[in-house]
Amino acid sequence: MGQKIDKEVFDKFFEESYCAVEYANVKAEFEEVAAAGNDIFTGSYEAKNLNRENFILYLTSESYCDFETIVQETVDDLNPEILDAVMDITEMQGDGDEVTEKYWETQRELLHEFLLRLYDEVISGWK
């Protein structure tokens, strides 16, 4: 990959190569992290006041990072060719993160979607 890759080329490659990640792929690991109960939330907020709209704001940094890592590793495991391309572009181009924005955006969207699903299936039942 010695040539400069532009955003449009990467986006097309991503769309053609991406293997979708479903909640089922992360469910067990998400629930394992959530098994810590109220310990996944900061002490500044009572779990009984949490709701679907605000609970993500009150996750501890550690638990949020744990969820984020689970999503990233799952995306990468299911899409090794995309990961290789992202790494190559990032190493070879000063604007690598801008070119590979679709990869990072997809992970952020999945994390948010999966956290909401975790809330619906697990955390909302804590009340």
Image (cartoon, helix red, strand yellow):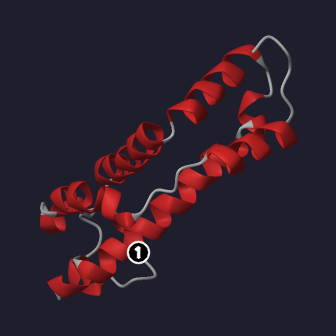
Q: Residue 54's x, y, as percent?
A: 43, 77
Specify the farthest residue to the left: 36
Quadrant in which the C terminus is drawn: bottom left
Front in this rendered view, residue 109 or 56: 109
Percent coordinates x, y for residue 73 in the rendering: 39, 40
Place of residue 68 in the rendered image (x, y in percent of width and height, measured from the top left): 41, 49
What residue is rendered at 87% in x and 33% in y?
6
Q: Dot 1 corresponds to which residue?
A: 116
Q: Which of 54 and 72 is in front in this view?
A: 72
Q: In this view, does 101 lie above or below 120?
A: above
**Camera-side residue: 14 or 115?**
14
Tell me which amino acid carries mark 1: Leu
Determine crowd level at label 1: few under 14, some 14-19, many 20+ residues with C-alpha closer than 10 A.
Answer: some
79 or 28, nearer to the observer: 79
- Circle count: 1
Farthest residue in the top direction? 2
Please report the residue visible at 64 percent of the width from the left and 30 percent of the height from the top: 86
Residue 11 as seen in the image, left or right of residue 53: right
- Quarter placement of the N terminus: top right
Q: Residue 123: name its quadrant.
A: bottom left
Residue 112 sits above or below residue 86 on the image: below
Question: Picture coordinates of residue 97 (x, y %)?
Answer: 71, 34
Query: For this view, does 126 lie left or right of residue 94?
Result: left
Residue depicted at 46% across the width and 45% down the height: 75
Q: Check disc 1 and report its element: helix, strand or loop.
A: helix
